[in-house]
Amino acid sequence: MKGTKFSCRKNANKCVFALFIILLLSVFAFLFPFRKIENASASVNPSLKCYRYDVEMTINTDRTIEVNERIDIEFLRSGFTMFYKSLPKDSKYSNVVATCAGNSDFTYYVDDNPDYSEFIDICCVGGADKGNRWTYEISYRLEPAGEDVENGMRLDVVGFGSPFELNDVNVTINFPEKTLSCDRYISDVYGSKEKRPITSGWLNDGKTLFIHEDKLALVYNDTYNERMAEGITLEFTFQDGVLDSFTQTQIFTERTWIILLIGLLGVGGAIGGYFLGKNHGEITPVVNVKAPDEMDPMRMGFLIDGNIGDEDVTSMVYYFADKGYLTIDFSNKNKPVLNRVMDEKGIFKELPATAPIYQKTLFEGLFKSGNQVPVSALKEKYYESVDEAKIQLMLKKPPRYDKKSVVFFLLSTLFACLVCAVSFILVGVINVGGDYAPSDGVFIAVFLIITALLLWVTKELEFKKSRKIVLSFLVLAYVIGFLIFILLTKTHIFTAYEKLYLSIFAIVTQLIGFFTLSRTESYNKILGDILGFKDFIVVTEEDKIKVMLEENPEIYYKVLPYAQVLGVTDEWVDRFRNILIEKPSWAYGFEYSVFDYMLINSSMRTITRTMAMRPQNTSSTVGRTGSGGFGGFSGGGRGGGGFGAR
């Protein structure tokens, strides 16, 4: 068939390489996400005015923080639909609630920031018309996802990044015990400390800190090319034992129960699929000294791994030679010539009418330009016949896998994806609140789809040496994918330990599906015959080889194409290291000795590279929105985040 469409069926190694490239691109796309950063001038006329901003935080011994914010805002411009509070994803959030007294159109929800993936927004919708003034009350629980200070915290009590000045700022911090130290300072996006003093005082025997600032002014940030309001950062420590250890708070949380429930459901579904879909029939190799059912090497190569590689195709040249349809001139060892054989009547031989159509396509394609063809002349031309023959053979493939097992194999990957996606969504909706449905679980689904393809190829290559390469890529995919998921994805939903639990459940679920995948009884029988022939190639002893040579002097060359497609050429060659064999009847043009049969092996590789070569230059036919600003930066501590409108 004409054309230059690429197909993963060409051979397993190229398919695996393509999957690996996709994996790397996915990794880089995740590590270096594109941002919509608009190179606009700094805002001179703010879209919002803040009359008063109150924050109350209560620090709990389990390292959670109850946050209540109250902000008095006036909309100075038209065109907005909402006011929002941004929260950086370097901490976890739960129990989000927002209210707006007197605003009958008010609703709220939580969603990922549309411009910056590092933040989620508490979106307060309704009444965002020019001239309207509302007091928004927002509360949530904050769980810092890191331990920046031993026996303490670094906390942004007023987040840096609001695109308008914050006036009459009042912060109240309730500590569980008196602090050993408590440093408070004005901060910007870089976490720098201002020299000017902060008005603050202690109440309740040193357990409550009150901070007041008349105004947190706009400062220019050249990274984002706009002005943003200053923030306030608090860094404090306690005596040892006041706060629970950070690790203790991460290993098991109220969210872990959701992971365990969803994970066990996924694994249970996969186990159920194993018992319902597994075909427990076994492959029984039947040793044979010749190819079963007069099978040609190309068909054998296809049946052993479900793919048709270049070696499978070019092995047919030697098959045709052994059958007496062509000879090979090795006068020039680097440029062998194929010669079509004549019969007794002087007519060039044709394949018998009963020959499979793909054999005829390959044979006729060899001599399309004449009856004497240098292999080099097939370069960038023969591939058309190869593509057509591959399709013709694949159309005749027998049913290889039990349909039920394939269904449950695919379902296991679906279950693994759902374990991650549903866990994220349930925690978002139930734990975070505001109908938050994070998309972070989709990221792991990309890797699970890639690993599912690699698992399929691993099954296909079960009896080929290249299986080890695929297994290496599979392990690499799991390691890269889940390390990124565990260590580098945002921590606003799960702890690193909880993401590890998710990863384990996902992998176990998918691997159970892999072990469910099973072949049909008829295909097991075919593979048993092929593997029995392969065993003959690999394990036959030298003494027995010598006896067989007396009966068939050309047995080495008869078996060589099959050894090539089965990936055991070296083993077959080793059987003849110390045996003198005659040259094949179809080869001539060179001085032959006991070692010259190695020329046949090297020529097979040369012919494979040349005949499968394709033309080099053929083409295959198979901005931030709104003017309210972002305002979601922190000043170097956990929590924080600013405000904005869109």
Image (cartoon, rainbow, N blue to C red):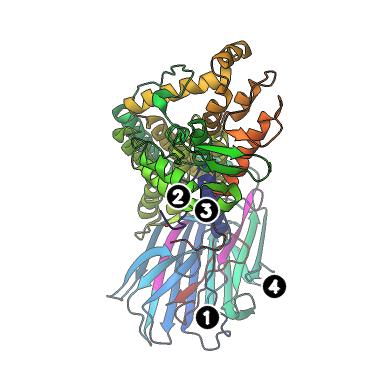
Tell me what residue is drawn at x 44 percent, y 59 percent: 140
Tell me what residue is drawn at x 36 percent, y 61 percent: 434
**Residue closest to the far front:** 345
Residue 88 vs 523, above or below: the answer is below
Q: Nearer the viewer, residue 460 or 205?
A: 460
Mark nearer the N terminus (2 vs 4):
4
Can I make out residue 27 in this image?
A: yes
The picture places residue 469, in percent across and down from the top left corner, at 57, 38
Dot 4: within a 10 Å radius of its alpha carbon, few (fewer than 14), some, or many (20 or more) residues? few
The picture places residue 258, in percent across and down from the top left corner, at 39, 42
Dot 3: within a 10 Å radius of its alpha carbon, few (fewer than 14), some, or many (20 or more) residues? some
Residue 22 has which mark? 3
Residue 194 has which mark? 4
- Could you give the CA–CA distance between mark 1 and mark 3, rounded to whole angstroms? 43 Å
Which amino acid, by three-letter code, is at mark 1? Phe
Mark nearer the N terminus (1 vs 2):
1
What residue is pinned by disc 1?
A: 164
Which amino acid, by three-letter code, is at mark 3? Ile
Q: Which residues are magenta?
A: 136-160
What residue is pinned by disc 2?
A: 385
Front of the two marks 2 and 3: 2
The local secondary structure at tag 1 comes to loop
